[in-house]
Every structure is written in C-alpha cells, then in structure tokens.
Amino acid sequence: MHIETEATQQLHRAATDARVAARALARSSEATRNAALTNMATALRDHQPDILAANEIDVGNYNGTNAFRDRLTLNPTRVEAMAIGLQEVAALPDPLARTLADWTRPNGLRIRRVASPIGVIGMIYESRPNVGADASGLCLKSGNAVILRGGSDSTNSAKAINTALQEGLAASGLPAACIQNAPTSDRAFVGAMLAGAGLIDLIIPRGGKSLVERVQRDARVPVLAHAEGLCHTYVHEAADPAMARRIVANAKMRRTGICGATETLLIDRSIAAAQLPAIVADLRALGCDFRADAQARMVVPDLKAATDTDFDTEWLDAILSIAVVDGVDEAMAHIAKHGSEHTDAIVTEDAAIADRFLRGTDGAVALWNASTQFCDGGEFGFGAEIGIATGRLHARGPVGLEQLTTYRYVITGTGQVRP
Amino acid sequence: MHIETEATQQLHRAATDARVAARALARSSEATRNAALTNMATALRDHQPDILAANEIDVGNYNGTNAFRDRLTLNPTRVEAMAIGLQEVAALPDPLARTLADWTRPNGLRIRRVASPIGVIGMIYESRPNVGADASGLCLKSGNAVILRGGSDSTNSAKAINTALQEGLAASGLPAACIQNAPTSDRAFVGAMLAGAGLIDLIIPRGGKSLVERVQRDARVPVLAHAEGLCHTYVHEAADPAMARRIVANAKMRRTGICGATETLLIDRSIAAAQLPAIVADLRALGCDFRADAQARMVVPDLKAATDTDFDTEWLDAILSIAVVDGVDEAMAHIAKHGSEHTDAIVTEDAAIADRFLRGTDGAVALWNASTQFCDGGEFGFGAEIGIATGRLHARGPVGLEQLTTYRYVITGTGQVRP
C-alpha cells in the first residue's frame, strides 16, 4: 500500500514533467524534432562504451533462458542499429504536417481537421533494450512525450540508453522529459502507469501474452496492443494452383513466430483432392506439421487429426491447422468463429468471390492473392512501426508514425457567433 | 453475485446476437441501410399511440424533478421529431463508402485503408427517450449494431420505441438484433456492459457527470465520452473591440448549459481598462454573473472576487470567470493549467498571434474570431451527432457518422509472397 502510493507519486511527477515536455514538443518545428533524432543517434554512438558496460551488468545478473539472454544482449552492431533506426525515423515524412480534412461552412467558418500528437505515451516492454530507443524515436517524431518502463532485467541498459537519448534531446533544445525512463524498477510503477488516467494518454505494451493481457485487464488508460494473430489463408476453388502453393508456403513458413503468419488453411472441397496433397508436400519439405479436419484427412490420410481447440490456437510455430470448406461463405463463417480479426487472405482468380471475401471478413487486414506475412509496417511502407494493433479503435494493423497521432480542429472565422 | 452472473449471461446473449447482426450490417448495401432508416421512421409514426401510452406509464411512475419529467415526457411532436431525425440520417452520405488512403507498393501490392464499422456499440443514457432512437439511427447508418441501456425511469418508453425500430428493420430484411434494448432494467446489466471486453467494442455514455465518471472508471471496453467542457475565450490586445464584445456575449450566454459555452474570459492587460467594462456590461444585460481576479476587479470594481477553484469550474450557468493575462503565452499557460482540452477561442486581428494560439493550445477545437458555441456536430456540418468526445484517441470533438467508424486494410495482389 505504501509502495503503491510512492509509485503513484513518482508517476505523477514523471507524467507532469512529460506533459510540459509534450506541450513544447507539440509546438516544435519538424526541423527541431529531426535534429533531435539525429543528435540522439550521435549520442548513442558516443555513449556506446557506457551502454555496453551497463548491458554487461544486466546480462551478468541474468540467469534465465539463452533465448532471452540473446535478446537482452547488446553489442556494437546492435547499438549502431539503434542509431541508424533513429536516423531513418528522422528522414520519414512529418506525421504532424497533415491536414486530414478542410472545409468551409455556409457561414464562412473554415474548419480544418489537423493531425496532432496524442500527448504522453506510456511504453511498457520486455527484454530487448533496443525497443526503448526505437519507441523513443517514433514518439519524438510524432510529437509525443514517452515514459518508458522496460523489463527489470534490462534496467541498467535502459538507463544508459536513456542518458544518451536525453543528451541528444538537450543538444537540440528540447526538454529531457520528452523521453523518460521509469524512475524506479519497482513493479508498482507499472500499476501506477496503468491507473494513470489523465496523466498518461495511451499505454503501448510490447511483450509476451501475459504482459499484454495484464495491461488490457488493468489499464484505466486507452491501450494500443497486440493480442492475438490467428490468421487464415483460404484457397478458393478458382485459385491458381501454383500461386496457392507459393502463397500458403510463404504465409505459414517464411517466419512462423510473427503475428501475420497463417495458422489455419481453409481449402474448398471441390479442389481439395487435386491440390491439398501438393500444398502439404511443399509445407512438409519446409518442416511443417499439421492438424487437419476429417475431410482433409480423407485426401491426405497421414495428417494428424485436429482437436476441437486446434482451430482456436495461434501456433506461432511450424504447425498448420487445415479445414475443408464449401465455398467462400463457409470460409468466412469459419474465420468469424475462430479468427482474431487480424489478417486473412483469399487465393482466387475470381474477382467477385475475392470482393465478397474482402468485404465480408472483418479483420484489420484482408488480402487477395498475397501472403498474410505482409501485415507489417515496413511492408506497408510506414518506414518504422511500434507494433501491430489488434483493437478496433484508433488504429488497426501496423502502428507507424501516423497512428501515433490523433487530430484536432482548427477553425478560423471573421467574427461569427452562433445563432 | 448471482444477479451479476445473470446480467453477464444476458449481456453475453445480447452481444452474441449483436455480433451476428453487425456482420450482416457490415456487408449490407447503403440502399438497404437507408431503406431501414426510412422504414424505422415510418414504424415510429405507426407506433406513436403505443409509444405515447408506454411513456405515460413512465411519466406516471416518475416522482422526481419537473425538469427531469419534462425531458422524460414524449408527445406527438417529439415522436415526429425522432422520425424526422431518422429520415435525415438516411439522407446523409454513407460513412462506410470512404477510402481513407490508397497506395501501391513497389512489389505491386495495392493497399487501401477503408472505413469500416466499429462493430457492437453499447449506449448507456439517461432521461430523454429520444436518445435511444437517435443513437439507433446513427449506429445503423454507420454499420454498427447497438445495445441500448436507457435510464430505468424510461423503461417502458424505450421498449415501445425499440419495438417500432425493430419492426422497421425487419421490413428491410436486416436482423432485429442490429438494435437491441437491454433485456433487463437491472443495474447489474450496466456493469456487465462495462465489463464486456470482446463482446462490446465501444461504450458511449450520454448523461450526467456521475454516469460518465462511473463509465470511465469501471469500463474494460473503450469509451467515447464527454467529460468536461471548460472552454476559454481569450481577447487579445489586437482584437476588434466590437467583435470581441459580440463573440464573448455569444460564447457565454447564447446557451449556458452546453459544453461549448465559454466558462472563462481571458483578456490582455493592455486593453482591459478600455474594453472589459463594455464586455461586462453586455453580459450583465444578458443576466450574467462574474468571478474575477484582482486585476479585473481593478478595472470593474464591483465584480465578485474569484476563489482559487473558480478557474477550474465548469459553470454550465450564467457565470463567467475572468482573468487578466499578459499576452498570448500567459493565456495559453492559463488554458493548459485550468482547461479541459475541449474548445478555446482567441479574438484578435493579428494573424501571427492567432496562429500561435491555434497551434499552442491543445484542445479538441481551437477557434480564431468565432464563438466557442460552434463546437457542435450540426455546426460542423455533420448532419447529426451522437455527442462530443473529450478523450484524445479515436475521435475528438463532435462525434458524427464518420467518428462511428474505424478502418481496415484491403490489399490486392497478384501472388506476392514476402521475401
């Protein structure tokens, strides 16, 4: 209780500083923000020895899995990659220089809807220390102050990176409080952030499922999060068979651990016998395992039988669920029942069927004749992304600079009063 | 506990039906949705006797204030106004027929960001039964299913209106579950709605401050709400004196109870002696009272002294707080400290100062030489609005049909796979 109170006070101070910094940032010119990003990149390079030394302490203290240790570990290449990332963000178009709508009313009032920063963003992330630098760059470019709360395993690394970034900020005349590290590694600070209505405008969690679920459950502040990517590829009877093989193999196996990886293949009954064996053979050659419904196993008998929950499972692994369907409506019904409204693709040469699928599914991304693995900010041309959002409000799909802004109205008159 | 469980089950059933209906609605044509709105208007007229009879029961049971009873009471004119409202919404442009962005990547993928319905909206409102009909029309037009939970005082009226609206839906072939009334007037149902993550996509509360605060505090679902409208009008030293008088009088006194009404006048020190007396005299003639800082009282001594909290008070009444400031930066600092990021106006003939103010304030709406009372969906040309949002995400300011939509990506390829 006492700790919670202390964390709340610490958050209040940090968020109050962040609010003041956010106002300065909102008024800053694009040139100032870009100069800051360049200076931040330079400072990261200058501070490389301190950052690596701090990281060495974190890695030394860590006693968990090797995979996690690898993500935690920094080296000169990784520090340089952070610096390059900041320079790349500096080179992207200013997301605040956008007029989203502009109209004049009969009474002469001119109304403009313009992009504006969200305000103060709380970033809660795990493991990779570079997430802090990347998020700092994206938030700064989009005019938002950020409070970063990294994993407790990377406290020293996060602090060293933050010191460098704030030095870069100072060199461009922006307040250090634009980019703040959590002042404590106390877990209660996370609770204070989640409860920070009015102090923090948006929480972005980046990490494992349990972190995201905790944030979504406890936050009293809007959250932009990635929950689940149960993506489907539907091979329609009018699919080009070679294209279907190529797309399914890529959608499943290019990388199995990303959210846009296909987890379930839906294939039309009328072509299953002709095409499923080749699709399965391609995937098997790539090391894929299967969970198939009874009809698919009629065609390829040695497929493992799917259980009731398999079609609701995000494998994130070299496993593919397979169900046979009777046409596009049944495919869409399967997706509506089992999907996570993330990314779904149809393979077909029939434009009318494709249109029905593109309109009739309800995920953040619907693709026609392309791999679900294209659900990615880089592939969208966003230049950089802070993550992928699975909620339905504010932003869906890849979250780039534009999605880190909101809007406001600027109205110019000549003395109008309301009748 | 048992009641909560029952309410949760009721919500689950209603929301599941709503989800199915929302999918049908999302695929429906504009013509179908407009026909439904027209049929709903006709059904309201046909059902006028039932609606008035049901309303008579509600009014008879009610034993509170006269003001509330008046808002609760329906008559033929008010029922006709609901029907006309639905027809007007039918005539508005389709908010779903919007492509928000459209680009082609070097690999040939064409990416379109298109407007799409939010899904299932939970509407929690008090007193006026017409809010249910208005919200139903806006949700239907924007492709969203809605679950309505009106005040317990208007249960019979809400049920009769809903019966009519569902009849109109049926006549156009859309599922009745597009527009559902809460199946119970049990208060636990509100709790179930607020806890309905995954079942309800957005909660919109319409009512008094305590309702909105409860929703914002308890909701596990995104909320689009109006919290507070502490609006400012700043009269800069380069203001046209006659225009300043006209705008301040209108911004404060046209209607004092709306959220866009000005609550605080800021006036530059250099012109206070010359202009404040006339501004005060105009307002006094309209019945306004004042809470003024010491400097303002130097100029107009009989103004009542402001207390510490007056500048943080949303009067919603014929009372104006007055503070003297030293230029635009001090005005913006006052607004940042005391305002609610709603609507703020500057009166000046100096374009550079106006620009500084328009960029430097951070409310949903910033006006130059116009009355703050223009913060209204009708005045923006939205045709109809469901309310005004004071949050920073998804929608700010008036919430019309466009703000009741979200977006998704539709990507068309020719067999692209991700390298």
Image: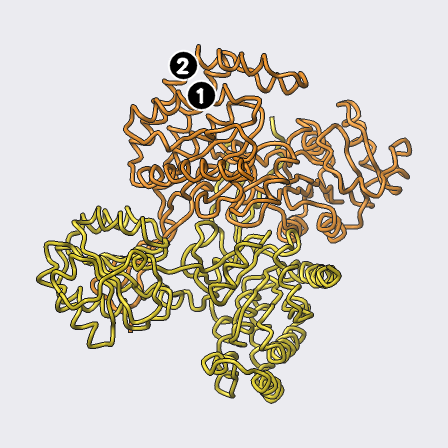
Chain colours: A orange, B yellow
Disc 1 marks which amino acid? Ile
Disc 2 marks which amino acid? His
Identify which residue is drawn at 45% across, 66% down.
B385
Identify which residue is drawn at 65% across, 48% down.
A354
Q: Residues within 10 Å of mark 1 (few under 14, many from 20)?
A: many
Q: Residues within 10 Å of mark 2 (few under 14, many from 20)?
A: some
In primary-sequence order, the first of circles 1 and 2 is 2
Q: What SS does tag 1 mark? A: helix
Q: Are marks 1 and 2 in contact (CB under 8 Å)?
A: yes
Vertical arrangement, residue B246 with respect to residue A388, above or below: below
Quadrant containing the N terminus of chain A is top right
Q: Is residue B11 left or right of residue A325?
A: left
In whole angstroms, how far apart are the C-alphas of marks 1 and 2? 8 Å
Identify which residue is drawn at 64% across, 36% down.
A372
Q: Residue B65: x, y in percent?
A: 48, 80
State the residue in front, B73 or A296.
Answer: B73
Q: Which mark is residue A47?
A: 2
Q: Which mark is residue A161?
A: 1
Vertical arrangement, residue B24 with respect to residue A223, above or below: below
State the residue in front, A276 or B202.
Answer: B202
- Mark yes or no: residue B58 visible: yes
- Judging from the image, mark 2 belongs to the subunit labelled A
Vertical arrangement, residue B75 with respect to residue B381, above or below: below
Q: Is residue B145 left or right of residue A52?
A: right
